[in-house]
Amino acid sequence: MRRVLAGIVIVAVIAVFLSIKLNAFRDYQIAEIATYTTAVAGLTVLTGLSGQISLGHGAFMAIGAYATALLLLHLGWPYYVVLLLSAAITALAGAVVGVAAARLSGPYLAGATLMLGVALPSIADAYPGTFGGDQGLTVAFTAPGFLGANFPQTRWQAWVATATGLVTLTLLASLSRSRIGRNWRAVRDDEVAAAVAGIDVARARVLAFVVSAACAGLAGSLLAVITALVAPGAFTLTLSITLLTAAVIGGLGTLPGAIWGALVIVLVQPYITNLANSHGLSSTTSANIPIAAYGLILILIMLAFPQGLQGALSRLLGFGLVPLKSEGVWGRHPPLKERDTSERT
Amino acid sequence: MTEFIQFTLSGIVFGMVYAAIALSLVLIWRGTRLLNFAQGGMAMLTTFIALEVVYKTGDYWAGFFVALVAGLLLGAVVELSVIRPTVGRPELNSVIVTIGLLILVEGLAGIFFGGQFRSFPTAFSITGVHLGKTPLGVSRFDEFVAGVVLASTLILAVAFRFTSAGLRMRAAAFNATVARLSGIRVARVLTVGWALAGLLGALAGVLVSPSTFLYPNSMDSIFVYGFTAAVIGGLDSPTGAVTGGLILGVGLSYVGGYIGGGRGSDLTAIAAMALLVVVLMLRPDGLFGGSRLRRV
Amino acid sequence: MTEPALAVDGVVAGYGGVTALNGVSISAPAGTITAVLGANGAGKTTLLRTISGLVKPRTGSVRLHGADMTGHAPEVMARNGVAHVPEGHGVIAELTVEENLRIGLMARRVSKAERARGLGDAYDRFAPLAERRRKLAATLSGGERQMLVIARALLARPRILLLDEPSLGLAPLVMAQVMDMVTRLSRENGITIILVEQNARGALAIADTGVVLNLGKVVATADAQSLAKDVALRHHYLGF
C-alpha cells in the first residue's frame, strides 16, 4: 500500500506541474484523462476483479452527470457536496442494477448491461421538460475565490478532476487488498467454491456494482463540469464501449491499467486526426481514420498483448502480476473444455 | 382494431430482421461460445458492397446475391484471421476483438463510402397492402422480408438436423473433443459456422436498409435489438432467437405506436430493456435457455 | 519382422508446466490387447491422448505400423485408423444413438449404401442400440453407453483402439460384458487395443501384454499373465 501512495503522490505532482506549464487545452485533456481514469478504474474492478462484465457503464456516468447538472441548477449547492451526492445517487442505481444482475452470467449480463447503456440516455429525450431533451442542460462551475480572479478555469478543473481520480484510485487499491477484494476474486474464480467457503456471493457481486457505479458517477459529474454541458449525445453506447476497451487495453483488473487506458482514449484519437489532416486528407476521411485505427489497435493489442499495457509493462520490468483467472469472466459459462487446442500450441 | 393489426404486422416484419441477427449470433455462440459484436458492422459493410453492385449493374438481385456471397466470405475471413488466434484465451479477449473489428469496419466504411445516409433500393413495392379495404400497414417488400427470413430459418433448421454437414456442426458444438477424435475437422466446421452467420447478417442488412437508410452506424441499433432478442430467447436456442425477435419486434411496435406524443419512439429502447429485465429475472438463461444437457 | 501396430518411443509430454510422461516407450503388435495400468496420475490418460494427437509430445515419437505420426492433429490420427475413446467422453449426450453412430463413420469416406450397411451391422450386433436408435444418448444407461461407444468406434474400422477406463462406473456384471466385448474386438476384428484400466485384475485377465506406469515412467512391461502373478509388483503399483 505504501508503494501505491508513493505512486499517487508522484502522479499528483506531475499533474499539477503539467497543468501549470501547459496551455488551457492541455489542462482540459488532463481533466479528461482524470475523468476517464475514474470511470475506467471502477469498471476494471467490476469486470477484472469481480468477474462481471458491463457494456453499459456509460449509463452510470450519465446518471452522475445529470444528477450534478440538476443539483447545481435547482439547489445551487457547493460542488464538493454535489460531487459526493452524485456518486451516492449513482451508487444507489448501481445497487439496483447489481441486484437485478446478480443471477446473470457472462453473455446474458453483457446483453442486459448493453441494453442499459442504450436505453438510459434516451430517458433524457423522452422527458425533455426535466432533462433538457436533446440540447441538454448547461452546467455552471467556477473556481473558488481564494485562488484569485486570474486563476484559469481549466486549471482548476484539472486539479479537481485529478484529485478525484487519485483519491478514487487510492480507495480502490485499498479495497482490492482488503477482504472485500479477496472475496471478489474468489467469486470471480469459482462461485461454488466461494459459496462453500462462506462468502455471500450475491452481496459481493452487488457491492462490486455499487462501487463501480459510484466511480462512474464521480466521473460523470466531472464530465458535466469540464464540458459544461450534459446531453444524451455524450452518453451513447460508444461511451460504454470506449470505457470497456480502455479497461482492457490498459490491463483488465489493474489500477495502473485504468490510467493507461484513459491516456489512450483521450490522446490517441486527436493525435491521429491531426496526423491525417496534416497529410491533406478530406475531413470525412480524417475523421474516420482514427476510428479505423482505434479498432485496429484494439484487435492487435488483444492478439499480441492480451494482458493489456500494464501486463506488457510488468513483464518488461520483470515483476509479477496479480494473476488473472485464465478462464475468462463468463462466470457460469466456462470455455469449451473439450477443445484442447491450448495443449497443441 | 386496424391500428392493432398494423402495429402487429409491422412489428413482425421488424422482428424477423432482429431474428436474423439473433440467429447469426446464436449460430456463433453455439459453435464457439463467443459473441460476435461486429455482426451488425459486417452486415453494414456487405450492404454497402451490394449498393455499389446495384449502382453499377442497375440490378437489385445482383446486389442481393453479391451481399450474401460477401457475407459468407467475410464471415469465413474474420474467423480465420482474427478469431482463430483468440481460441483458448479468455473469452473477453474475443469480445474485445470483435468490438475492435466493429470499430474498424465502421471507420473503413466511413473512409471508403462516406458518412451520408444512402437509400437502399427494394425489389418489391413499398406501398401499403390492403385486405379488402383495410390497410394492413405492411407492403409487398415487408412480406418479402418476413418470407425470406422465415425461409432461411427453415432451411438452416432442416440442414442442421438432416444433413451430414449439419451433424458435423452439431457434434463439434456439443463436444469438440469427441468430434475431433472421430475425424471431424472441427476447425473447418467453425469457419463454416462463421460464414453462415455472416450470410445471415448480410441478409438482415439488405432487408432492413431500405427502411433505415445505409450509413456506417446504421446497423448499430439493429444489432443491439438483435442481440437483445437472442438473449431473451436464450443464446443456445435457434427457436429462441426467432421467438425473441418476434416478441421484441411486436412489443416495440406496440410501444412506439400506442404511446403517443412522439415520446413513444424515444421509449422503445427503455421498453426493450424492460422486456429484457423481466425475461431475465424469471429465466436468467433466456426463455429457451434452460435445456443444456450434462456431458457424460 | 513386421512393424508393431503401435510403437511409442521415448515420449516426453505434459500440460503447461507439468510433465506427465517422462520418456515412455511401449510397443504393441497388431491384433493384441495391451493393458496400461498404474495409480491415478501415473500418466495413463496422457499417454492415450499423446497417441491420439490431443497432446503434442515434446520429444519422442509415435509410429503407426512403422509410419511416423508424431504430433499430428487428432482429426488426422482418426482418419489414419486411430480411435480414441476418452474417459467420461464416450458419447455425445445431446445427439441421438443413430447420430452418434453416424459420427463414427466420419473417419472414413463411405457411400450411402455402406453407411446403411454399417449401421445395420451395429444394430445387429448390439440389439439395445437398435431399440433406442432415435433416443438421445443421454437417456442410455451406463452399460448401454459403453456399448454405443464401442459400436461407434468400430464403425470407424480403426486399426488401433484406445480405451480409457471403459468400465468406469459400471456394475460388475456389466463390466464383465464390456471386457468380453473388448476381447472379441481384438480376436474377431484384429484390432490392436490399448486398454487403460483401474480395474487391473480384469484388464490383465483379457490382455496379452501389461505395461505399468508410475509417475510418468514405465516401471514394468511383461506379458499379462506374468504380471498378474507378480505379487510384489501388484501390491506396490496396482493395489491388489
Image (spheres, coloured by chain):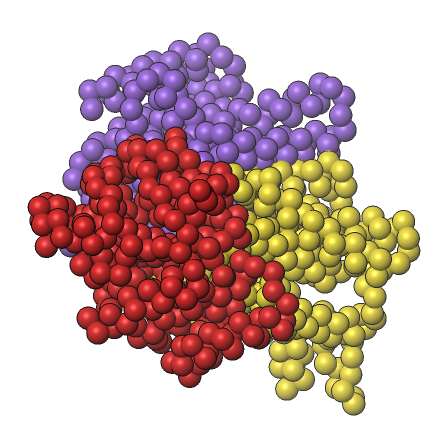
Chain colours: A purple, B yellow, C red
Q: C108 or B185: which is nearer to us?
A: C108
Q: A10 or B183: which is nearer to us?
A: B183
Residue B87 in picture, x, y percent from top left: 47, 43
Disc count in the image?
A: 0
Residue A333 visible (yes or no): no
Q: Is residue A120 left or right of residue B101?
A: left
Residue at image point 67% right, 69% down: B152
Q: Quadrant of the N terminus of chain A?
A: top left
Which quadrant holds residue B143? bottom right
Q: C219 or C188: which is nearer to us?
A: C188
Residue at image point 25% right, 17% down: A6
Which quadrant holds residue C125? bottom left
Residue C31 visible (yes or no): yes
Q: A288 or C227: which is nearer to us?
A: C227
Residue A45 in picture, x, y percent from top left: 32, 39
Does A222 sit above or below residue B244? above
Residue C183 in picture, x, y percent from top left: 33, 64
Does A154 sit above or below residue B37? above
In the orientation shown, which residue stands out farthest toward the bottom? B132
Which quadrant holds residue A290? top right
Residue at image point 64% right, 48% down: B76
Q: Is residue C83 left or right of residue A178?
A: right
Residue C110 in picture, x, y percent from top left: 61, 64
Residue at image point 63% right, 34% down: A292
Q: Quadrant of the C terminus of chain A?
A: top left
